[in-house]
């Protein structure tokens, strides 16, 4: 679950995952009015354990991270309104996601991602600036040997030692491991030295807890200017409140603070000032696994480093108190400056309850005042994640940190709320941005939502020339969308392009460049960063490459005509398992709840035949054949080769073979196999031309196989065989050049159709042609191939052998030129 502003209106919205797999988003409207609900539908994977949100591509709307127990994590990237989403898979899908955060770990202004893995090493993902992510273990040096790398439950970012750099604390728990000295149970504190180097300082400062920690939180409980820590552990009396000594060392004050006897199985723990009295309170929720029903506790901060439990705080609308609260997310869901609670009332660790409905608890305001602050970064990341806010007043100094992702897999509001009690005056608000810029707002009014954009309070003399720090080289496949962010080491207020190709645009505020790439070669684009100190200009070199050809499966499936597309876990050609001692396709290696598919598109009507077999866990993992997404047939278990015949109806249809796994256990080869795929489009009038091809090129079945409508000496049957255009005399299969070398080899250059497959055949006579190349997939309108020919090299236009030899060409046995 999550509470976060998703549509950019400054109001917190609610994200709910029903029964761990169906997504609902409730958009806050005006106070007292119903929420506007978006039913996104079922997520791509079930058993969701983590959700967090941030604007990863700087389009002004927060995107959602979705973390399942298996099958791989992914993003839902927000569209232009913040109310539609497109799924984007994250690399390396072998992960059991636990707590997850967005943060800018290398402080380049781009929001990165850190996903805890219950069973293996954690997954740090680096953002390229435009919302694309790559797995980079070195982003944080958090890796451990495989034998002790598991047990990662929650992660939080904080500046524990007040050096201005954001550190990372990892809460660890490994069920079944009984020793508190086992490294799979020992929490880790990664200190940032300011140069993006992280070292584990947990033992040195007293945060190397080994008591099965579910999550932790950091806040300033005594308004003395440093971050104290609460660690939620499983085990009677093991949860701890630790006071920061001001230099980053911690001492246990649990007993004296009144928090030494927590004996329930906690799930979430959050510091917040729920009554806006200037003192940070503590909320803990718990599962039903500790011998009692799922429950919660709110501990009021007394202002003297002690806490008192406040009973029966959460009540139903009729006034009756509730006790069952399993998990929660926090934010202001009626925009009144007081923190509300959305309560998840599940069971176990991540189970749903058939009898307990989730509940929204709106805070009953008292007379205390507040200041709510919403930050927007420029040089810093757009959500200002990692920013520290200081509120100075009669209470001393209150601290807040902007975080995206907290606790055990939930997201709390990015709006930072300060309670100021009965005070009506504030001395100042200090914002320490992740970029290093510090801004002050003097005497802000109470009881307001204050929106601040990085740099808006600076005068012209405060600026230095913006230095462009983003990479000046980029690569894109022709036809793919290109995204890039211009980043600077000093604050830039606007961005511009020069000499940009057609269609390329830049967002002048965010510096994000977008372009639908085309052509081939290097595009040199001028990028400019502007502020009152001047303009910096650099040249961005974009290498545009042609797309690689589709996978060549012709020999494996005995069919050179079908063009296949592959999944991220691709099918591949192998010779260990095939129908007749040759080659066949095998599904890729996938994790639990994952899938590996291969697909092609045909235009019917026509008949499809193929052979397939499964080698899987019976009844659970399966090989599925689908047409246009609908399942037609499936295999499961250890099967023999079986042939399938399927009549494809008229129209364009997508054929997919998919190996799909459930949530656990692998058996046999854990794979599916495909061989001998044949496709024959219907030829209802018997003219040697498939009906679909005739309709596509002539609009009806009136054309004859021997006709030559474009007069290029290639009849329609030859044009169909060669995949050329029968209505264009320049579109034909012909040899452009044959050059013979001294060793008897030749290079054949022929006109081709991109994406189509060809073979070269040769003979000394007009009979008994022999294939002299493997199937070749054309990448352009001209294809060059080295061959051993039976005749001398020559140059000249191709002459087709005869109407019955479509696609074969004759090179005259004569020498022309050199």
Image (cartoon, rainbow, N blue to C red):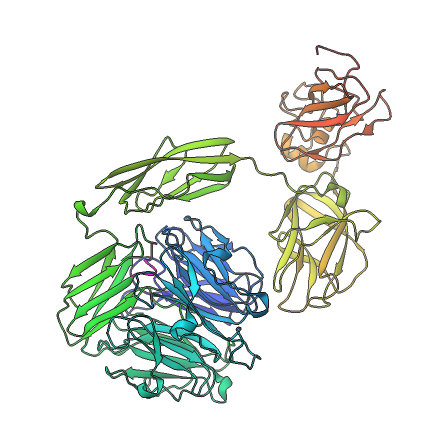
Describe residue 808's horizontal placement relative to residue 252 as left or right.
right
Residue toward you, 221 or 24: 221
Which residue corresponds to the image point at 15% horizontal and 68% vertical from the top-left? 426
Question: What is the x, y in percent for residue 504?
Answer: 40, 37
Name above or below for residue 769 compared with residue 658. above
Q: Position of residue 149 (x, y in %)?
A: 55, 68
Q: Is residue 258 visible?
A: yes
User: Horizontal and vertical percent for residue 682?
Assistant: 74, 40
User: Where is the C terminus found, in terms of image quarters?
Assistant: top right
The prevailing secondary structure element of the residues shown in magenta is: loop
Where residue 785 appears, as percent x and y from the top left, is 70, 28
Q: Nearer the viewer, residue 81 or 817?
A: 817
- Which quadrant is home to the N terminus? bottom left
From the viewer's side, name the closer residue of 120 and 365.
120
Up the image or down, 777 lies above or below 629; here it is above
Quarter assignment of residue 734: top right
- Span highlighted in magenta in the image: 381-387
Q: At 82% from the left edge and 51% from the top edge, which residue is drawn? A: 579
| Residue 405 makes an appearance in the image | no
Q: Residue furthest front?
A: 204
Q: Give the quarter of the image for residue 4.
A: bottom left
242 up-or-down from 709: above or below? below
How many marks can you see?
0
> Is 391 a magenta residue?
no
Is residue 384 in the magenta section?
Answer: yes
Q: Name the side, left or right, on which 266 lies relative to 579.
A: left
């Amino acid at each position: 679950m999550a509470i976060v502003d998703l549509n950019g209106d400054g109001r917190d919205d609610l994200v709910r995952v029903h029964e761990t797999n169906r997504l609902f988003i409730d958009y806050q409207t005006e106070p007292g009015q119903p929420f506007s609900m978006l039913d996104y539908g079922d997520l791509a994977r079930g058993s969701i354990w983590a959700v967090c949100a941030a604007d990863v591509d700087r389009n002004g709307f927060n995107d959602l991270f979705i973390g399942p127990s298996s099958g791989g994590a992914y993003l839902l990237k927000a569209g232009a309104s913040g109310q539609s989403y497109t799924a984007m898979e994250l690399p390396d899908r072998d992960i059991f996601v636990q707590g997850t955060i967005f943060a800018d770990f290398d402080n380049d202004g781009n929001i990165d991602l850190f996903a805890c893995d219950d069973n293996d090493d954690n997954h740090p993902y680096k953002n390229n600036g435009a919302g694309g992510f790559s797995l980079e273990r070195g982003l944080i040096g958090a890796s451990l040997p495989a034998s002790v790398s598991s047990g990662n439950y929650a992660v939080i970012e904080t500046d524990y030692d007040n050096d201005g750099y954001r550190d990372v604390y990892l809460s660890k728990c490994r069920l079944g491991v009984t020793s508190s000295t086992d490294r799979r149970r020992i929490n880790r504190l990664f200190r940032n030295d300011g140069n993006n180097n992280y070292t584990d300082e947990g033992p040195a400062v007293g945060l190397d807890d080994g008591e099965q920690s579910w999550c932790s939180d950091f806040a300033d409980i005594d308004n003395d200017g440093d971050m104290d820590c609460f660690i939620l552990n499983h085990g009677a009396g093991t949860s701890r409140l630790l006071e920061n000594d001001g230099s980053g060392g911690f001492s246990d004050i649990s007993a004296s603070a009144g928090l030494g006897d927590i004996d329930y199985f906690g799930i979430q723990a959050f510091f917040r000032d729920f009554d806006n009295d200037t003192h940070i309170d503590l909320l803990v929720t718990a599962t039903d696994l500790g011998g009692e029903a799922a429950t919660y506790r709110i501990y009021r901060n007394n202002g003297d480093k002690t806490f008192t439990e406040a009973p029966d705080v959460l009540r139903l609308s009729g006034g009756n108190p509730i006790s069952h609260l399993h998990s929660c997310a926090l934010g202001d869901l009626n925009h009144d400056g007081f923190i509300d609670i959305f309560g998840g009332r599940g069971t176990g660790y991540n189970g749903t309850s058939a009898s307990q409905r989730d509940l929204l608890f709106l805070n009953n305001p008292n007379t205390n005042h507040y200041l709510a602050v919403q930050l927007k970064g420029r040089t810093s990341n757009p959500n200002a994640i990692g920013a520290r806010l200081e509120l100075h007043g009669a209470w001393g100094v209150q601290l807040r940190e902007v975080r995206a992702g907290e606790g055990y897999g939930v997201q709390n509001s990015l709006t930072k709320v300060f309670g100021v009690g009965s005070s009506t005056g504030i001395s100042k608000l200090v914002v320490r941005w992740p970029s290093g810029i510090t801004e002050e707002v003097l005497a802000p009014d109470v009881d307001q939502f204050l929106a601040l954009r990085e740099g808006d309070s600076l005068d012209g003399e405060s600026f230095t020339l913006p230095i462009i720090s983003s990479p000046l080289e980029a690569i894109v496949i022709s036809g793919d969308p290109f995204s890039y962010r211009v980043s600077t080491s000093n604050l830039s207020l606007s961005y511009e392009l020069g000499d940009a190709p057609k269609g390329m645009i830049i967002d002048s505020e965010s510096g994000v460049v977008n372009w639908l790439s085309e052509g081939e070669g290097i595009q040199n684009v001028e990028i400019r960063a502007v502020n009152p100190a001047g303009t910096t200009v650099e040249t961005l070199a974009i290498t545009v490459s042609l797309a690689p050809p589709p996978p060549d499966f012709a020999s494996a499936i005995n069919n050179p005509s079908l063009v296949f597309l592959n999944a991220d876990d691709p099918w591949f050609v192998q010779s260990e398992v095939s129908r007749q001692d040759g080659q066949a396709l095998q599904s890729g290696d996938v994790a639990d709840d994952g899938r590996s598919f291969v697909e092609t598109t045909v235009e019917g009507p026509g008949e499809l035949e193929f052979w397939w077999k499964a080698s899987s866990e019976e009844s659970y993992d399966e090989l599925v054949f689908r047409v246009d997404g609908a399942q037609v047939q499936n295999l499961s278990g250890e099967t023999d080769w079986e042939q399938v015949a399927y009549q494809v109806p008229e129209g364009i249809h997508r054929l997919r073979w998919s190996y799909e796994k459930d949530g656990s256990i692998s058996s046999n080869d854990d794979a599916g196999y495909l061989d001998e795929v044949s496709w024959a489009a219907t030829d209802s009038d018997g003219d040697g031309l498939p009906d679909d091809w005739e309709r596509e090129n002539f609009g009806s079945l009136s054309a004859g196989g021997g006709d030559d409508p474009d007069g290029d000496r290639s009849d329609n049957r030859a044009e169909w065989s060669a995949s050329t255009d029968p209505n264009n005399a320049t579109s034909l299969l012909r040899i452009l050049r044959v050059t013979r070398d001294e060793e008897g080899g030749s290079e054949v250059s022929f006109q081709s159709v991109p994406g189509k497959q060809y073979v070269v055949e040769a003979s000394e006579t007009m009979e008994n042609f022999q294939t002299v190349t493997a199937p070749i997939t054309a990448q352009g309108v001209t294809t060059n191939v080295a061959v051993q020919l039976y005749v001398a090299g020559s140059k000249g236009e191709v002459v087709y052998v005869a109407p019955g030899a479509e696609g074969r060409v004759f090179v005259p046995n004569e020498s022309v030129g050199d």
